[in-house]
Amino acid sequence: MISRAEVDKLLEVRAPGPSLLSLYVQMPLDPAGLRGLAAHVGELFALAARDGPGVRPAVRVGAAEAGAVRGLLASHARDWLGRTVAIFACDELGLAEAIPLPCQLQERAVLATRPHVRPLLLAIQRCPAYRVAVVDRRHTWLFSIADGQISTAALPLAEGMRSHGFSGWYGLQAHRVNERIIQLARHHYRDTAALIGQAFRAGGAEPLVIGGHQDTIPQLLAVLPPGLRDQFAGSFVADPHTLTPAKVRDLASGVIQDWRTGHDQRIAAEFLGEPPDGRTVTGLSACLAAANRHAIQLLLVPAGGLVPGYACQRCGALSSTGDSCPHGAAESLAVPDLIEELAVATLGDRGQVETLPDPPGGIAARLRYPLA
């Protein structure tokens, strides 16, 4: 499962020239489709070619990089059927690495001096690792789901809880027995919340889905500490004793998709609701100016598209034309994607990058301070 730590590690890789190939390719679902994979990859290689002003010399996928990609596909393509795979290759650096991704993404091939990571950030955002707690009055089952795989960790039975078949005395005694069971159940939910908290502290911040009977879900929610409640993504109703791990994964995946859609809508609405104080900008030119001032706190980018531009070799300033930096056009080198450069610059300035289906103005940013 790809993580931000792995993305950060990739961003430390640098080639002396634009020879590092980043390939995102969709594997066929049917093994018979592998026969046409080599030709399809060749078409993607052609899309990575660049020439023109600022490209010295014309950029093409090298024979060594193409060979490394084809070697990885020949060895592992059958293991990746139906998946999008990111492949990074650079003969000068001895780099040939493949990362199967947890969700399907747009195909692309990019040649640059460092790995092209925008699709990886999107995969982390769209298909996060998450936890699922399935609860009844006596048991809790905790599942961890990442990269389409599910693992389980059973939590303890609530001490002293009676079985579902328990029948007590009539009258007052029956009330007292039932009250005792309710008290023990409440302890069970509190214990469950504490154990889930321990699991999250060990595994990092991940969305939490809760499943179970209609009446047990709100009881667990009521005792979650604030930190865990903030990670609550949603719930599904099901009888825990009829569930299999695969069914849990299927029910929870829909909850996560809805949670992600709601998150995107909330981010866009909050941005559009910001006061007109100069701390929000839209459009590529305004975002480039903000990035060159290290002013971006939150960058909203689209999922697709490549926007070629220029970066100054001396100060790193980004531009669409290559002649707006004080160091002059001679210091500007062509880059294949300004949106990628903006995202990497924002992360380097400890800002946040969010991918939206339709960001305001095509691309937008919330700033740390208004630009003069």
Image (spheres, grey):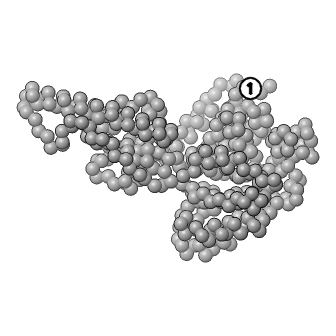
Residue drawn at x 46%, y 31% is: 227
Q: Is residue 259 left or right of residue 360?
A: left
Q: Is residue 230 above or below residue 86?
A: above
Left or right, 300 with reference to 164 = right
Residue type at numbered disc 1: Pro
The residue lying furthest to the left in this view is 170
- Residue located 60% across and 63% down the image: 26
Is 313 above or below relative to 187? below
Q: Residue furthest front?
A: 94
Residue 326 drawn above or below residue 10: above
> Is 219 or 94 nearer to us in this picture?
94
Callout 1 secondary element? loop
Near mark 1 (Cα within 10 A), the count class, few <14, some 14-19 or many ≥20, is few
Q: Which quarter of the figure is the C terminus placed in? A: top right
Nearer-the-camera pick, 361 or 116: 116
Image coords of residue 183 (percent x, y): 23, 29
Report whether residue 161 is seen.
Answer: yes
The residue singled out by tag 1 in the image is 370
- In the figure, residue 136 lies in which quadrant? top left
- Of residue 304 and residue 343, the one placed in the foreground of this image is 343
Residue at x 53%, y 49% (from the top left corner): 127
Residue 357 seen in this snapshot: no
